[in-house]
Image: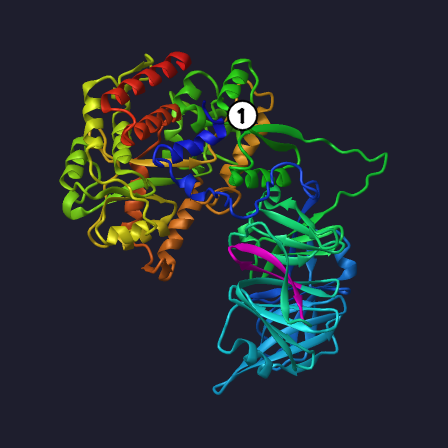
């Protein structure tokens, strides 16, 4: 039984040894040992309105944080400007915050603080504002607690150095802080052992709480009580801090954060926990929790959220980015009550074939589009292969179809999708010369442009120049000879991390596709003697993949593998691979029948417009939005942008970057030669047609059976021939 079409893209990645493995790299797998929450479907806050808000100040530097009192919202920078009247706090009053605007300007409130003091943490209660600062001299580092009233005035200073050193000694990290109902201040450091310093406002030590086998992630106060979240016994756990007992009381296990944790006070007597998928609300009185908002509904990746907070019961502020001079924020507000005479214009709904659970990147892109567009809204709907084909035949089906799921050739030749060339010619946003011509040509069949992927990556194979030569490209015979001379070594590591025998067969299949399947006539040719001989060669290869946890990079350095397969998603990753491989390297690419250079292009977001769609203009608006806004980090999956300007910006920036470190390797700036080689990878790229998905499934299932000893080589070849021929008979 075939899986859903939207999941078949993942099967093409995972089953066929990740020949389109870039997308698989981005996919997250749920951990069955930890609590997981399904963010698909209607969540309590999913229908809140979304507003893009710009907040600006006349200062610059690193934004230290945000704090809310009854008099408004405060922010600050982590240094005192020279010749300033004092340390400037930036405030938006409570009255202004209650007015929904598209741009807010901060007013200054000066705090008397010596210029040598450097603030590093800001937090608050409804009545007070707190700031932690340090002072570094040649002899020592001193720490101070500043306390103001709710308007940021009447500042008081307390030296907390002695208490600080008692708790943390030489330990450093991002500082977390919260205040309880008795005015006690709780301080911890993020990502370290759970040590919580408790001090009084006069700076004196109250206690130090220590929790063994727990990594502290965040602190928050609610209804006069301080709570924290930490990683304990393999799970993200919510604790209540009991200062009298000097202990942490376990409240509940939370959804797995996967590195993103924010704990904030919520509406009523609740706490909000922001993790990579969503905001999770825990009701402290009822003792239960649920997801209330999925980040993807706002077009956001939870792992890039810097901050969020609840200002009142009807508004949530989300900060996806922190910039030096301005702050772009997202305000979510409950729908306003409309009068009887007030009418709304319903958006036209466009259906896209996809999986909102598995494909989180698509969900984020749809969320961002639905916010930005006032005429159309996109809805994700899951289809399995049989249902999709049946609806397409009957003239129905979704408006947007993943091209790789049905095959570029089939989509074009059978008239399943629209030709996008006319749309591109009349677009006021996009033009052909704005887009990468190589990508467009790969998705064009007989002059028909089937899709415009917003981004892509290039998968290539790296080998040793001393053994393979310095030029890319080799034949299948050369590949097999190379493998035969190195029996006992793992054939491939990296993207194609699997049993060497299976890797070899799938490499052969990709090189011999036209010889083993006649797509036009619908004839399978796996009963040829050549296929059986190659299968026998792979069957007798000694080295299998042993599932080592050691990285592919280490295994390459130790000489345990022949080829290193990696997705090139930008110039930095390409330079990283060069550093891993050292001077003895060549991007040899995939073996082909003719020995011509061959890499694989794997596209993200390649959707075609259903030729039978009644919403073609809306479907084009979504494609247009993805392609025009994609820069490798906005709206869709990271990768190389199809938009020429974004790709060129990425390449130019790589030449200007200073030396950076990735996994212990120092990556230098790109040279002109590096960029020339990068462009050549794209010039030599091809795509694998989506019709191969089902054949890939058949091959991998039967190869598993053969290599596990469940079926002979001859029997395996016969079964593959029969199964593929049956598929061709039924579909072609």
**Image quadrant assignment for residue 127:** bottom right
Please tell me whether residue 13 belongs to the stretch shown in magenta: no
Q: Which residue is mark 1?
A: 383
Left-right relation of 314 to 322: right
Q: Position of residue 236 (x, y in %)?
A: 56, 55
Left-right relation of 336 to 460: right
Tell me if I can see residue 604 in this picture.
yes
Please tell me whether residue 229 belongs to the stretch shown in magenta: yes
Residues packed near mark 1 inside 10 Å, few (<14), some (14 to 19) or many (20 plus): many
Q: Nearer the viewer, residue 437 or 335?
A: 335
Looking at the rendered structure, the secondary structure element under dot 1 is loop
Q: Position of residue 192 (x, y in %)?
A: 51, 66
Give above or below for 426 relative to 170.
above
Q: Nearer the viewer, residue 585 or 10?
A: 10
**Image quadrant assignment for residue 160:** bottom right
What range is drawn magenta here?
227-243
Give above or below for 63 relative to 157.
above
Q: How is the image coloured?
A: rainbow
Tell me if I can see residue 115 in this picture.
no
Q: Residue at x 41, y 24 (%)?
A: 407
**Image quadrant assignment for residue 490:** top left
Give above or below for 213 relative to 344.
below
Magenta span: predominant SS is strand
Left-right relation of 572 to 475: right
In what quadrant of the picture does the C terminus appear? top left
């Amino acid at each position: 039984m075939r899986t859903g079409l939207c999941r078949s893209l993942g099967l093409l990645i995972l089953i066929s040894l990740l020949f389109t493995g870039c997308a698989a790299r981005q996919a997250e797998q749920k951990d069955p040992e930890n609590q997981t929450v399904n963010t698909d479907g209607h969540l309590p806050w999913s229908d809140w309105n979304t507003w893009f808000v710009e907040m600006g100040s006349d200062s610059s530097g690193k934004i230290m944080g945000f704090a809310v009192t009854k008099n408004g919202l405060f922010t600050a920078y982590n240094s005192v400007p020279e010749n300033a009247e004092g340390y400037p706090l930036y405030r938006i009053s409570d009255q202004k915050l209650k007015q929904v605007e598209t741009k807010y300007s901060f007013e200054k409130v000066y705090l008397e603080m010596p210029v040598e003091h450097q603030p590093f943490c800001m937090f608050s209660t409804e009545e007070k504002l707190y700031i932690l600062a340090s002072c570094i001299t040649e002899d020592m580092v001193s720490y101070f607690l500043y306390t103001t009233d709710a308007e940021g005035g009447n500042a008081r200073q307390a030296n907390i150095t002695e208490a600080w050193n008692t708790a943390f000694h030489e330990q450093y990290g991002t500082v977390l802080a919260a205040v309880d109902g008795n005015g006690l201040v709780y301080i911890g450091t993020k990502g370290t052992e759970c040590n919580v310093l408790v001090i009084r406002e006069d700076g004196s030590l109250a206690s130090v709480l220590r929790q063994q086998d727990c990594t502290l992630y965040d602190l928050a106060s609610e209804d006069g009580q301080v709570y924290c979240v930490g990683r304990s016994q393999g799970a993200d756990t919510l604790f209540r801090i009991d200062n009298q007992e000097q202990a942490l009381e376990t409240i509940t296990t939370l959804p797995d954060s996967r590195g993103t944790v924010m704990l904030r006070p919520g509406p009523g007597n609740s706490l909000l926990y922001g993790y990579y998928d969503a905001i999770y609300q825990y009701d402290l009185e009822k003792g239960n929790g649920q997801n209330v908002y999925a980040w993807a509904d706002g077009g956001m990746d939870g792992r890039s959220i810097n901050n969020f907070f609840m200002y009142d019961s009807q508004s949530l502020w989300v900060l996806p980015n922190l910039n030096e001079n301005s702050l772009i924020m997202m305000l979510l507000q409950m729908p306003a009550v409309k009068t009887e005479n007030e009418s709304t214009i319903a958006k036209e709904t466009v259906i896209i074939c996809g999986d909102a659970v598995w494909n989180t990147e698509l969900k984020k892109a749809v969320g961002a589009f639905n916010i930005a567009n006032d005429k159309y809204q996109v809805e994700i709907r899951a289809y399995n292969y049989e249902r999709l084909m049946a609806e397409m035949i009957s003239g129905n089906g979704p408006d947007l179809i993943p091209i790789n799921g049905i095959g570029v050739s089939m989509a074009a030749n059978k008239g399943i999708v629209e030709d996008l060339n006319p749309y591109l010619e009349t677009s006021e946003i996009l033009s052909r010369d704005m887009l990468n011509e190589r990508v467009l040509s790969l998705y064009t069949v007989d002059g028909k442009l089937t899709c415009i992927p917003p981004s892509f990556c290039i998968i290539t194979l790296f080998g040793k120049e001393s053994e393979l030569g310095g030029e890319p490209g080799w034949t299948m015979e050369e590949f097999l000879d190379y493998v035969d001379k190195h029996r006992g070594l793992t054939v491939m590591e990296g993207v194609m991390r699997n049993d060497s025998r299976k890797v070899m067969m799938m490499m052969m299949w990709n090189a011999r596709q036209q010889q083993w399947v006649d797509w036009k006539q619908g004839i399978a040719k796996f009963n040829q003697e050549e296929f059986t001989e190659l299968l026998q060669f792979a069957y007798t290869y000694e080295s299998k993949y042993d599932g080592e946890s050691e990285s592919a990079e280490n295994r390459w350095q130790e000489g345990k593998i022949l080829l290193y397969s990696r997705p090139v998603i930008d110039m930095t990753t390409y330079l990283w691979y060069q550093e891993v491989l050292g001077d003895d390297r060549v991007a040899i690419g995939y073996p082909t029948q003719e020995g011509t250079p061959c890499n694989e292009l794997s596209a993200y977001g390649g959707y075609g417009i259903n030729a039978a769609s009644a919403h073609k203009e809306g479907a084009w608006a979504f494609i247009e939005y993805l392609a025009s806004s994609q820069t490798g980090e906005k709206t869709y999956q990271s990768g190389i942008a199809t938009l020429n300007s974004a790709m060129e910006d990425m390449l130019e920036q790589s030449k200007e970057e200073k030396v950076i470190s990735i996994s212990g390797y120092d990556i230098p700036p790109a040279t002109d030669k590096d960029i020339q080689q990068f462009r050549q990878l794209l010039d030599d790229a091809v795509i694998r047609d989506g019709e191969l998905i089902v054949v890939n499934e058949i091959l991998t299932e039967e190869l598993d059976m053969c290599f596990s000893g469940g079926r002979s080589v001859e029997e395996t070849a016969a079964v593959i021939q029969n199964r593929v021929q049956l598929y061709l008979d039924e579909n072609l």
